[in-house]
């Protein structure tokens, strides 16, 4: 039987894109018109495609008919199951023609190419901000609407993004599904795995055009640039204090809520930040996995090792913008020194929110709350 291949005979009269099926052209046109003719009869949410509505309905029903035959995990859509299976097979069939980087999904490749082209085709109709990825635009829109559709069924906390929700759930479950194929270390977030892999590859593709410093991830470069501009876009809705990083705002909010979700399984002590718990655990284990390759000295944290290395290199990357004096360490010297000029008290007690100009002063003051007496007479 002769099979005829007609090609793409249906053309969009707005942008010129071509399609092999009339239905595909019809659905495509909704991206121009904004029309969403398919409505969910449970929550009223609208969609431009019938298949997307079907996927959405599984949120209400909880149905997950697609099962992974390797690990048994279930999914509401066949697409998500196919995506998941790449974790097991490690298959990455989609390669970037510019830099050669490979991806398991076509849409990941499409998003990646925007790094090279700088294209941001998705624009917010409220504030005009543009994004390279549609999902980034959708996430951004929650800032305007305040909507948080993803709720944790364990602690009832709500999130605007599914990725934040998934990350949060790993706190309860302890699940770490992303594994490094070089050293075997596991992570709860894909972004953390990507950051970790740069330790092995040494790759830093994102470069600051102001000072030339390079970074493994785009968000690290974005946050770094705030040190040059002084911009602090994240504001606390309780006290009005502003921060250059979203994570710093999240940590700050604990001052108001008093929440300490990270518990030490050895002594039971609780912490507001996972980082502080990791730091604390080193007291029990005595582990110092970070070694200086110059003098051999070991440290419990990478940040301590990085600060120590400046002793050997003589580098002083932190500069006071008031008097021009430079320092090798940011917190211990630069913050304290700047407060001497401005009178600003940058170090806060996380128990009562009292502020101090120097970090050691907070450390000393906190013993009022804890009753801890660190210095014992050995005689």
Image: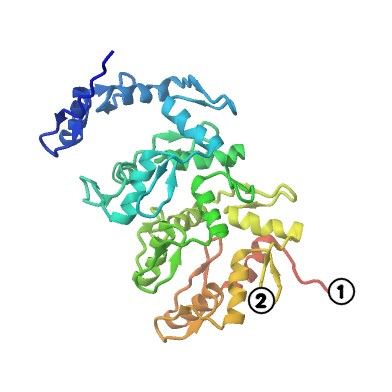
Residue visible at 39% across and 83% down?
322
The answer to which quarter of the image holds residue 210 is: bottom left
Residue reaching furthest to the left: 13
Per the rendering, the mark at residue 294 is 2
Residue reaching furthest to the front: 1
Q: Pinpoint residue 13: horizontal percent, then vertical percent.
A: 10, 34
Quadrant containing the N terminus is: top left
Q: Nearer the viewer, residue 238 or 92?
A: 92
Q: Is residue 317 above or below residue 122?
A: below
Relative to residue 102, is residue 43 drawn left or right? Answer: left
Q: Using the numbered discs, state the Cα–Cα distance from disc 1 to disc 2 in whole angstroms.
A: 36 Å
- Which one is earlier in the sequence, the residue at label 1 or at label 2? 2
Q: Pinpoint residue 366: horizontal percent, then vertical percent.
A: 63, 65
Q: Answer few, some or many: residues within 10 Å of disc 1's Cα (few below 14, many 20 plus, some between 14 and 19).
A: few
Quadrant containing the C terminus is: bottom right
Q: Nearer the viewer, residue 304 or 50?
A: 50
Residue visible at 55% across and 27% down?
73
Residue visible at 29% across and 49% down?
131
Relative to residue 50, is residue 350 drawn left or right? Answer: right
Marks counted in the figure total 2
Residue 244 appears in the figure = no
Residue visible at 74% across and 67% down?
373
Q: Pinpoint residue 267: horizontal percent, then vertical percent.
A: 74, 51
Mark 1, residue position: 378
Residue 126 appears in the figure = yes
Q: How is the image coloured?
A: rainbow
Residue reaching furthest to the top: 1
């Amino acid at each position: 039987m002769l099979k005829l291949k007609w090609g793409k005979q249906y053309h969009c009269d707005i942008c010129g894109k071509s399609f092999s099926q009339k239905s595909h052209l019809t659905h495509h046109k909704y991206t121009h018109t904004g029309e969403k003719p398919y409505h969910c009869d449970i929550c009223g949410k609208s969609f431009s495609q019938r298949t997307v509505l079907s996927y959405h309905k599984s949120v209400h029903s909880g149905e997950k008919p697609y099962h992974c035959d390797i690990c048994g995990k279930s999914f509401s859509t066949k697409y998500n199951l196919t995506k998941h299976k790449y974790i097991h097979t490690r298959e990455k069939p989609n390669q970037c023609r510019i830099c050669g980087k490979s991806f398991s999904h076509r849409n990941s490749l499409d998003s990646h190419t925007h790094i090279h082209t700088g294209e941001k085709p998705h624009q917010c109709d409220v504030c005009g901000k543009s994004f390279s990825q549609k999902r980034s635009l959708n996430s951004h829109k929650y800032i305007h609407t305040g909507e948080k559709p993803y709720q944790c069924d364990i602690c009832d906390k709500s999130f605007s993004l599914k990725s934040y929700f998934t990350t949060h759930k790993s706190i309860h479950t302890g699940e770490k599904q992303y594994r490094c194929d070089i050293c075997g270390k596991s992570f709860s977030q894909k972004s953390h795995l990507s950051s970790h892999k740069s330790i092995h590859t040494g790759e830093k593709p994102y470069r600051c055009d102001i000072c030339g410093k390079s970074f493994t991830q785009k968000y690290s470069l974005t946050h770094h640039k705030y040190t040059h501009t002084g911009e602090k876009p994240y504001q606390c809705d309780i006290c009005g204090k502003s921060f250059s990083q979203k994570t710093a705002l999240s940590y700050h909010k604990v001052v108001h809520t008093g929440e300490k979700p990270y518990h030490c399984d050895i002594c039971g002590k609780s912490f507001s930040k996972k980082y502080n718990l990791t730091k604390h655990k080193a007291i029990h284990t005595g582990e110092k996995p970070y070694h200086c390759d110059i003098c051999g000295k070991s440290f419990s944290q990478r940040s301590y090792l990085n600060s120590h290395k400046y002793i050997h290199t003589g580098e002083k990357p932190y500069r006071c913008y008031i008097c021009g004096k430079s320092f090798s360490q940011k917190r211990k010297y630069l913050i304290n020194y700047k407060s001497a000029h401005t009178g600003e008290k940058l170090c806060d007690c996380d128990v009562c929110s009292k502020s101090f100009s120097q970090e050691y002063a907070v450390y000393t003051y906190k013993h009022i709350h804890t009753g801890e007496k660190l210095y014992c007479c050995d005689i």
